[in-house]
Amino acid sequence: MNRFYAILAATVAVVALGATWIATRGGSDDRFAQCRSSQIAGGADTIGGPFELLNSKGETVTDKDVITQPSLLYFGYTFCPDVCPLDTSRNAEAVDILEGRGKMVTPVFISIDPDRDTPEVVGDFAANLHERMIGLTGSPEQVKAASQAYKTYYRAQDKSDEYYLVDHSTFSYLVLPEVGFVEFFRRDDTPEQMADKIGCFIDAM
C-alpha cells in the first residue's frame, strides 16, 4: 500500500511539473512575452480593433491604412492645455530615438474632440509635433467607436464655453501591423524606456 501511494505521489508530481512547464514555457505562444511588463485585464486581445476616421486631408482612412508599420497611438485633443502636448512630444522623442536605432515607428494622434478638431486643425497639430505624425479625427460616432475599441475614456465639459476642456485617459498604445495592440505606456514612462520596450517588440516581430 505504501508503494502504491509513493507511485501515485510521484505521478502527481510529474504531472504538476509538466503542467507548470507548459503554462510557463512550453505552452506559451506569446512571442512578445519577454517584452511585456503591463498587466492587462482580459489580455491584450481585448484592446484595439478596426476603426474608420478622417485624416488631415479629410479622407476616410481605416486602421489598415494607418497602421502600416509599428505605430504609437495617443487619444487627445488639440486644445488640451498641457497634458496632450507633453505626452505627444514625449512620444515623438521616443520615435526619434528608435529611428536612430534603425527602427521606424509611426506616431499617431487621434482627436477625441471632433467638434473643434477638424481634419486641418488636427493635421497642423500633428505636423508641428513630428513630421511623420498622423493626425486623425472624424464624426462623433467614428471617434467614439475608435475610443471604445481601445478602452479609452473621454468626457467634454460644458460646451457652452468655447474654451471647454475634455477629460480623458492618457495612455499611449503600441500597435503592430497584422498583430494589433501589444502594449500601453503611462505618462511616467520616459522616451528612453518607451524606446527600449518598443524595440523589444519590434525585434520579436
Image: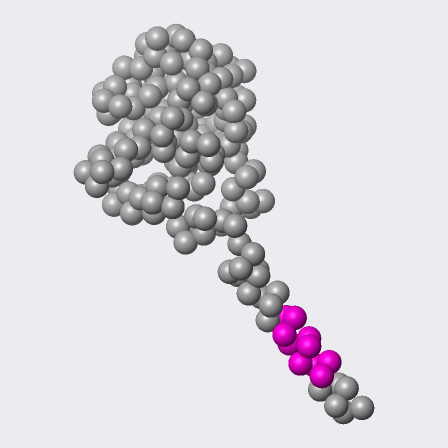
Magenta stretch in the rendered image: 7-16
Residue furthest to the top in view is 58
Residue 129 sits above or below residue 204 on the image: above
- Residue at image position (29%, 47%) is 196
What percent of the width, then of the height, locates residue 139? 49, 12
Choose top left, top right, bottom left or bottom right for residue 58.
top left
Q: Is residue 114 in view?
A: no
Expressed as whole percent of the image width and height from the top left, the position of residue 90 reads 27, 36
Q: Which residue lies at the image location 49% right of the left edge and 49% below the top edge? A: 30
**17 inside magenta stretch:** no
> Measuring 42% from the left and 41% from the top, which residue is drawn there?
184
On screen, residue 11 versus residue 84, left or right, reads right
- Where on the picture, by quarter, is residue 99? top left
> How far across and how far down the image is residue 85, in percent?
29, 28
Above or below — where is 108 with respect to 119?
Answer: below
From the image, give the main secondary structure of the stretch colored magenta.
helix
Residue at (27, 15) in percent of width and height: 124
Q: Name the outermost residue toward the right.
A: 1
Q: Is residue 75 visible?
A: yes
| Viewport quadrant of the C terminus | top left
Q: Name the spot of residue 41 as percent of width and height, x first.
A: 55, 46
The quadrant in which the N terminus is found is: bottom right
User: On the rendered structure, is 192 left or right of 197?
Assistant: left
Q: Nearer the viewer, residue 197 or 11?
A: 11
Colouring method of the image? one colour
